[in-house]
Image (cartoon, rainbow, N blue to C red):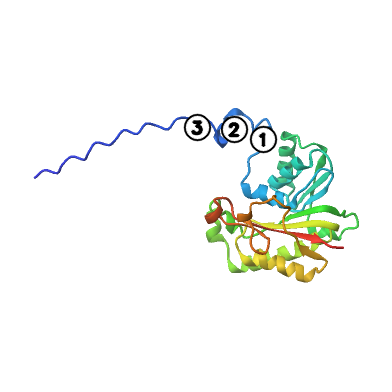
Amino acid sequence: MFPLPPPPRPHIPPPPPRSSGLGQLLRAGFVARGLCAVQDEATGLVVSLLAPAPGDSVLDACAAPGGKALYIADRLRGEGKLLAMDVSAPRLRALDAAARRLQSGPVLSTRAGDLRAYAASPDAETFDRVLLDAPCSGTGVVAKRADLRWRRTPEELAALVALQAALLDAAARLVKPGGLLVYSTCSLEAEENGAQAAAFLARHPHFALEPPPAGALPAEVLSPEGYLTLLPFRHGIDGAFAAALRRQK
């Protein structure tokens, strides 16, 4: 008996050209001309928790690569000031170039340096709002950075937790009385997120956890404690954590 020939494959027409999406924006030149910027929703939600408004003075303490800084500058609407700081001068130069492309105007300035040294210096300013998007394990973005699955170790996590605590203590010194400090990571690890925020509040009783402004964030991205908690498997975007910490005096 001879084997039967395979059935004919059905003809599936190609999908029609897409009229929306990132590819269309790139082809149309909107990004190159500085008419728009593209970033993950997690970035926007963290900035929404910070809630910068025209006239505010803002510090983005670990700014590079700059997505959050650019969005903060946009929300200032040309009024106020934003200092974007990072230890990497080359990455800040890339942020400067993006700011020029997006015409962020005079509100945004950059400074290369370590936040801890800046906070201890006599020329340090204080700000209405401080964003500390801290170095972290990155476990919330492994879909984009698969190499992290093999590169992270328990020892690295412990070192990152210690660094985050030191940066938080430095950032706290730069918040004006009544001002807001937002601590964020792109991690899913409790040690870097809720436990880190709780330890900070224990060390700094003049700060208090503050819920987001009414309507600023969808209820489904908030934990019972009031933290912004984004989970890729639940929300379909990058994983992230953020806590809003109000300085009382």
| Residue named by callout 2 | 25
Name the residue at 75% across, 47% down.
89
Observer-side mark, 3 or 2, equals 3
Q: Amino acid at mark 1?
A: Cys
- What crowding class fits label 2: few (fewer than 14 Cα within 10 Å), some (14-19), or many (20 or more)? some
Within the image, what quadrant is residue 5 found in? top left
Q: Identify which residue, 180 or 83, lies in the foreground.
A: 180
| Residue named by callout 1 | 36
* Residue 212 screen position, x and y as percent: 72, 55
**Mark 3 to mark 1 CA distance (whole Å):** 19 Å
Q: Identify which residue, 106 or 44, lies in the foreground.
A: 44
**Mark 3 to mark 2 CA distance (whole Å):** 11 Å
Within the image, what quadrant is residue 37 found in? top right
**Mark 1 to mark 2 CA distance (whole Å):** 9 Å
Q: Identify which residue, 103 or 240, lies in the foreground.
A: 240
* Residue 19 screen position, x and y as percent: 53, 30
- Asked which secondary structure carries label 1, the reply is loop
* Residue 149 screen position, x and y as percent: 53, 59
* Residue 66 screen position, x and y as percent: 70, 46
Name the residue at 72% across, 43% down.
71
Q: Is residue 80 found left or right of 14 in the rendered image? A: right
Query: Which badge, 3 or 1, comes first in the chain's sequence?
Result: 3
Q: Amino acid at mark 3?
A: Arg
Can residue 118 be seen at all in this image of the molecule? no
State the quadrant of the N terminus: top left
Residue found farthest to the left: 1
Name the residue at 83% across, 40% down.
79
Query: Which badge, 3 or 2, comes first in the chain's sequence?
Result: 3
| Residue named by callout 3 | 18
Determine whether label 1 and label 2 are within 8 Å by CB. Answer: yes
